[in-house]
Image (spheres, rainbow, N blue to C red):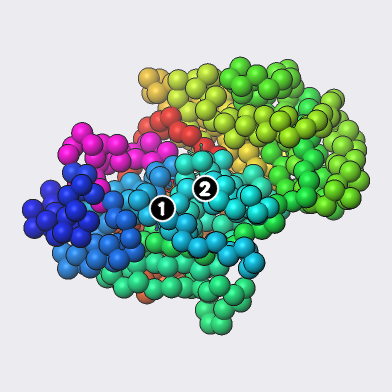
């Protein structure tokens, strides 16, 4: 339990009404979207300004107290689990859009601003913020920066790090530093780039300067319907090989299509082996030619039907079904667990075969809905947590799938981060020297390892043993 002294000092900074310390209320913060492990924080603090965050950090520094930053808690790797960090600093009240510079296409926003709110704030001027995680109506810019989040449209536009020009971060001793700058190229080491993807282990991001891009002149969105996952995977490679760079290239297999159709009634064919959503954007003059080329590739790779969205309403309905796909998974099984791996996109057919083989070997049902153009897979392992044997098989199959990703030249996470979920898999991709270098880098920002302990790197006393997967949402 925290000492009354510390609680008083925190309250002096933010006021009593910005502290949540009652057990019934702190339980809300016991996990993120990865629910395999839970830990209730002793106190959740809700600062409203950078100055308050810095003052809180100074108090915690004086008390040698570790802390965990939290945005909206939509993370999928246990990143904001308060392991060995009884104090949670939640940025949800840091929600001001500080500045919109239309001429230079930049926005300065506080860390608690919700991703979609940025695009909504500039849409009337024909601009948007490109990284669009499927959780974009809830997740915060601070969380996006910490996880270097992607989304369906990052195939063409890149992930968060490509759209963050500068960050303001409060270091664990309370110092406020600005890294990066408003210019495209800043002299010196790219310290901004280190903070993006650091999963909250360097301190608390309080502001970010974001790049805005012009809304494309037009979109064309098609649905390709395939008899087999293999045909759809080959079409993914074929589209890229034809020199087309779609804005998005997403795949859903039969199992997930059945669930999505039952939930949202878009009109997906439930007997198809897989469907592809291909979106092209850009100047209207070139879109029809490119779309015809994508249609030709789909047909050549065995598409039994290719349907082009007739209007904006149909396009929106298609994306709604895709982005809410995980909401429909509850129809398939009492519990599910999502993996997040990545392979070179030419290896998508191989990894899907490996997932199918793991499903057969472990007698499991595994659904797939994922960012196929990036090779970023999200197999959803379906199970019933009352069946201990099935639980063991789910864990074994998940680990096998990640190993297969690495063997195919990929990695253990495409966008959800390491958090606590993937700590044990780190040695699959990094040697001891790599880990030492990373720890040394971290020590520059956080020498006492008080910012989000127990994440990315194993910390003695802060380990989580994963024995039971539970229900989990995903991208
Ligand atoms: C339905 C669903 C769909 C999703 N789709 C996608 C997707 O398409 N692409 C994708 O990449 N992810 C996706 N995610 C995962 C998740 O939404 C992202 O990782 C998101 O960036 C997390 O933001 P958050 O505000 O919820 O952060 P949280 O979950 O609160 O925190 C995530 C991590 O960031 C750290 N953190 C949070 N705020 C700060 C801060 N201000 N300073 C420093 N560290 C901080 C936390 O300590 C933690 O380690 C999805 C999740 C769900 C539930």
**Which residue carries the number 1 mark?**
95
Residue at image x 19%, y 65%?
59
Mark 2, secondary structure of its residue: helix
Q: Which residue is mark 2?
A: 117
Is 169 one of the magenta-colored residues? no
Q: Are marks 2 and 1 in contact (CB under 8 Å)?
A: yes
Expressed as whole percent of the image width and height from the top left, the position of residue 416 reads: 50, 48
Quarter containing the C terminus: top right
Q: Residue furthest left?
A: 4
Residue at 23 percent across and 49 percent down: it is: 18
Relative to the observer, which residue lies in front, 99 or 252?
99
Whether residue 374 is visible, yes or no, is: no
Q: CA distance from mark 2 to mark 1?
A: 10 Å
Q: Residue at x 66, y 58 (%)?
A: 213
Determine whether 72 is above or below 321 in the image. below
- Residue 388 in view in this figure: yes
Tell me which numbered mark, 2 or 1, is placed earlier along the sequence: 1
Which region is colored magenta? 22-45
Taking depth in this image into account, of 5 and 227 the one nearest to the observer is 5
Q: Secondary structure at mark 1?
A: loop
Can you name the residue that lies furthest to the bottom here? 187
In percent of width and height, residue 417 lies at 48, 51
């Amino acid at each position: 339990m925290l000492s009354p002294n510390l609680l008083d000092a925190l309250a002096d900074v933010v006021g009593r009404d910005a502290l949540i310390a009652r057990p019934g209320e702190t339980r809300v913060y016991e996990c993120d979207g990865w629910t395999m492990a839970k830990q209730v924080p002793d106190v959740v603090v809700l600062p409203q300004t950078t100055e308050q965050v810095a003052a809180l950090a100074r108090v915690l520094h004086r008390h040698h107290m570790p802390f965990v930053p939290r945005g909206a808690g939509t993370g999928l790797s246990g990143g904001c689990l308060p392991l060995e960090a009884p104090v949670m600093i939640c940025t949800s009240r840091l929600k001001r859009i500080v500045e919109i510079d239309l001429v230079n296409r930049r926005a300065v926003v506080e860390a608690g601003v919700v991703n979609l709110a940025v695009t909504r704030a500039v849409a009337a001027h024909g601009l948007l913020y490109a990284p669009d995680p499927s959780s974009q109506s809830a997740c915060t810019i601070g969380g996006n920066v910490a996880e270097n989040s992607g989304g369906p449209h990052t195939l063409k536009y890149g992930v968060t790090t490509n759209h963050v020009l500068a960050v303001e971060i409060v270091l664990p001793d309370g110092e406020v530093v600005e890294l990066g700058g408003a210019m495209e190229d800043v002299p010196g080491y790219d310290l901004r780039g280190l903070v993006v993807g650091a999963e909250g282990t360097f301190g608390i991001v309080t502001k970010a300067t974001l790049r805005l891009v012009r809304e494309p002149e037009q979109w064309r969105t098609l649905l390709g319907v395939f008899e087999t996952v293999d045909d759809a995977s080959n079409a993914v490679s074929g589209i890229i090989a034809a020199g087309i760079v779609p804005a998005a290239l997403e795949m859903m297999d039969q199992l997930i299509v059945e669930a999505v159709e039952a939930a949202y009634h878009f009109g997906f064919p439930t007997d198809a082996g897989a469907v592809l959503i291909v979106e092209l954007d850009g100047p209207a003059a070139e879109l029809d030619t490119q779309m015809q080329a994508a249609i030709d590739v789909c047909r050549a790779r065995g598409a039994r039907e290719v349907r082009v969205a007739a209007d904006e309403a149909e396009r929106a309905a298609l994306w709604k079904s895709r982005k809410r796909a995980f909401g429909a998974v509850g129809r398939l099984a009492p519990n599910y667990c999502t993996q997040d791996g990545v392979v070179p996109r030419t290896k998508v057919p191989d990894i899907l075969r490996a997932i199918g083989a793991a499903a057969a070997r472990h007698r499991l049902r595994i659904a797939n809905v994922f960012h196929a153009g990036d090779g970023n897979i999200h197999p959803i392992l379906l199970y019933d947590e009352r069946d201990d044997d099935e639980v063991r098989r789910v864990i074994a199959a998940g680990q096998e799938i990640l190993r297969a990703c690495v063997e195919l030249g990929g990695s253990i996470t495409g966008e959800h981060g390491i958090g606590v979920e993937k700590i044990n898999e780190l040695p699959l991709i990094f040697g001891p020297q790599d880990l030492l270098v990373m720890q040394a880098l971290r020590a520059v920002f956080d020498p006492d390892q008080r910012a989000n302990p127990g994440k990315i790197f194993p910390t003695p006393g802060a380990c989580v043993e994963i024995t039971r997967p539970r229900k989990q949402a995903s991208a």
